[in-house]
Image: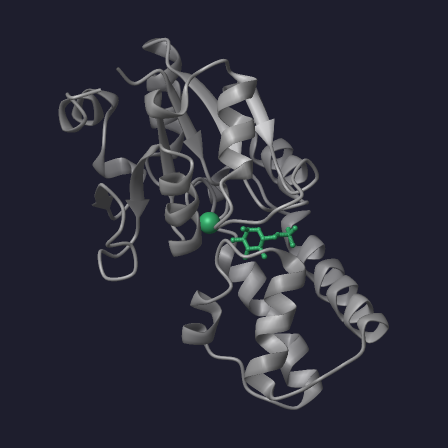
């Protein structure tokens, strides 16, 4: 039986991937190399520090920790400028209805995000009241694909991992769900998310009823 739905934030509930991309691209430009949208795929679901390391690897740069901390902060300041202006219009299609449906059907909801900016995004988009628990990058010590964020989410709503479904747009997030012993729904393209139990283009393409049907064995 499905008792809890755990949601990634960026790319599942809100369209922040574009802001992350713009901010990282600006940084790459400043450092003297091109960072493409395809490169950006590798940063989805990945923590800020790990993202910077990937970016620098793409640019072929090796920097010391102090300089890296500065650049990570600079990128984040730029990113925060964008998300500070977000509102409910940037909630992705189907996300709000799906959260409401979970509540109506007494399914617990938890956020499982790597972002340290999750609270600001939830507040600005008005999504905060739809969650029973919020686990973000300020609560975790290990980043996805480590299952920590989802295991903490399950614990916070008192549901066993096998009764949880994770919604993720990133490969690292699907791996985290699998490692946590949870079901997973990939949001995006089947090519990148082939490890997920189900893949849909957006939350508008799935209902709690359809989810229950797909996972009848639980
Ligand atoms: C999410 C995004 C990543 C981002 C990470 C950390 O997982 O998909 O692209 O790097 O959060 O976000 P933060 O807001 O803490 O930099
Ligand atoms: Mg994501």
Identified at 56% across, 35% down, the residue is 125
Identified at 41% across, 43% down, the residue is 12
Residue 51 occupies quadrant: bottom right
Identified at 43% across, 30% down, the residue is 6
* Above or below, comparing residue 74 to residue 139 in the picture: below
In the rendered structure, the answer to whether residue 40 lies left or right of residue 86 reads left
In the rendered structure, the answer to whether residue 207 lies left or right of residue 87 reads left
* Above or below, comparing residue 55 to residue 19 in the picture: below
Foreground residue among 144 and 31: 144
Q: Position of residue 49 (x, y in %)?
A: 67, 62
* Above or below, comparing residue 214 to residue 63 in the picture: above
Q: Position of residue 153 (x, y in %)?
A: 53, 27
The C terminus, quarter of image: top left
Task: Using the rendered image of the protein, determine whether residue 149 is visible from the camera's viewpoint.
Answer: yes
Identified at 64% across, 32% down, the residue is 123
Foreground residue among 185 and 33: 185
The N terminus, quarter of image: top left
Question: How many marks do you count on the picture?
Answer: 0
């Amino acid at each position: 039986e499905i008792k809890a739905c755990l949601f990634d934030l960026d790319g599942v509930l809100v369209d922040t991937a574009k802001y992350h991309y713009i901010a990282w691209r600006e940084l790459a430009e400043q450092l003297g190399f091109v960072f493409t949208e395809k490169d950006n795929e590798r940063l989805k679901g990945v923590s800020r520090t790990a993202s910077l390391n990937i970016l620098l690897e793409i640019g072929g740069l090796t920097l010391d920790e102090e300089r890296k901390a500065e650049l990570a902060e600079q990128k984040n300041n730029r990113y925060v400028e964008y998300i500070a202006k977000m509102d409910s219009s940037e909630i992705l299609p189907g996300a709000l209805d799906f959260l409401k449906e979970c509540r109506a059907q007494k399914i617990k909801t938890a956020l499982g995000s790597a972002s340290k900016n999750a609270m600001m995004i939830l507040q600005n988009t008005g999504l905060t009241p739809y969650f029973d628990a919020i686990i973000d990058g300020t609560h975790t010590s290990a980043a996805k694909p480590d299952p920590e964020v989802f295991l903490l989410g399950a614990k916070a709503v008192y549901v066993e991992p096998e009764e949880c479904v994770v919604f993720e747009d990133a490969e690292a997030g699907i791996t985290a769900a699998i490692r946590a012993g949870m079901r997973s729904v990939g949001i995006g393209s089947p090519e990148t998310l082939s490890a997920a139990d189900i893949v849909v283009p957006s939350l508008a393409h799935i209902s709690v009823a359809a989810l229950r049907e797909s996972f009848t064995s639980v």
